[in-house]
Amino acid sequence: MTEKPVSVVRATLTDVARVAGVSRQTASRVARGGENVNKRTAARVRRVIKDLGYRPDPIARALSTGRGHSVGLLTHQLTDRQMGLGAISIMIGVEQAAAELGLGVSVATFGSFDRVTVQEGVDRLAQAGCDGVIFMAPWVSAAETLCALDTSLPMLATSEVPDYDGPAVHADAARAAGDVVDHLLSLGHATVHHVAGPLDWISSRRRLAGWESALTSAGADVPEPLSGDWTAKSGYDAGLRLAQDPSVTAIFSANDEMALGVVYALTESGRRVPDDVSVAGYDDAPGSDYFRPPLTTIRIDDAEYGREAVAQLMLQVNGGTPAPTTILPHHLIIRASTARLSTE
């Protein structure tokens, strides 16, 4: 007969073994699946596990097996209004991919990407038993910080971090932006204006570079870009300025949220989209196909993004050699917000 459950703050495997009247080794076997344990004994142990509310300690499991069966995700604060839907989509993709492999995800957030703050985040993830860390490091200063980290955990970045030679998974943002520009120029527009994201973000700079390169290669004028902060409000402010220039017939926004603001500002100013001005975005944010008009944009498969990031990280964890860089495919999604320039 088993003893009555005892009251504990957090039940341990030792508690389970004592209450069930078995060795700790037997309790451990049952907790892992009950292999090679008498059925009646296993049933008794499982009953005690349920009564005590025992849950395996991920740190202890990692120490005993060398694997925590979870990945760490280090990212900027989720309350940051400038985070953007693209970053959120990547996070969701990582979590889905990890779940498919039976892995948990531990998230550590930071408000700034200085060495001390990020090191503390990595240390927290290591203490939680994470097998490796995926960095969502969006800022230009990321390389210096990543190179200075002191950790034995496998690492992987989801951004195109300049001067960082660690494994990375990301899209070719410059080429994707160039595809948007080429599309707009093919519709007869003489040039394409640009509403950029924050210039301390790597993705903003890469999209800006792709926009400028495509215009230069086509022999088109390169207008002065306007800067936003990923929000629809900043796109709206930029759109109001661009609406005052009758020569503006095509606008590429660095993300869909800002494009939404641009479209609203143009419409409010009496400029029709796409009759007078074509507008394109980037990210294929949820609902972009329900903009008025539906938005031409760049789509990157977020689920594939997550799968590749997790797969390359776990390749390191399991002793393999990951690809230095994995480039994700992108797709230009053409919708009704872009149209051939009217010659009337």
Image (spheres, grey):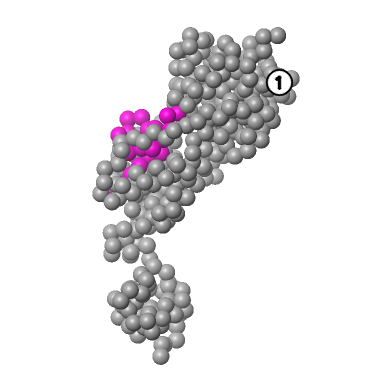
Q: Quadrant of the N terminus?
A: bottom left
Q: Is 63 on the left-hand or right-hand side of 327?
A: left
Q: In this orientation, which residue lies closer to the viewer: 280 or 81?
A: 280
Residue 2 location (% of width, % of height): 41, 87
Category of crowding for the residue at label 1, using alpha-carbon neighbours closer than 10 angstroms: few (below 14), some (14–19), many (at least 20): some
Which residue is the site of mark 1? 272
| Position above or below: 254 against 286 | above
Give percent across and percent down for residue 199.
48, 27
Range of residues picked out in magenta: 152-173
How many numbered badges does the structure rendering display? 1
Say if residue 342 shows up in the picture. Answer: yes
In the image, residue 327 sits, relative to residue 278, either above or below, namely below
Which of the 4 image quadrants contains residue 339? top right
Tell whether position 166 is magenta.
yes
Specify whether 164 is left or right of 329.
left
Q: Is residue 121 visible?
A: no
Q: Residue furthest bottom?
A: 1
**Magenta stretch encompasses residue 88:** no
Q: Position of residue 19 (x, y in %)?
A: 39, 83
The quarter of the displayed image where residue 290 is located? top right
Quadrant occupied by the C terminus = top right
Name the residue located 48 percent from the left edge and 9 percent from the top edge: 219
Q: Which amino acid lies under the numbered mark 1 shown in the image of this protein?
A: Arg
Q: Nearer the viewer, residue 210 or 142?
A: 210
Residue at x 74%, y 20% (from the top left corner): 270
Which residue shows up at 45% across the image and 54% down it?
99
- The percent coordinates of residue 210 (x first, y second) are 46, 22
Question: Overall secondary structure of the magenta stretch?
Answer: loop
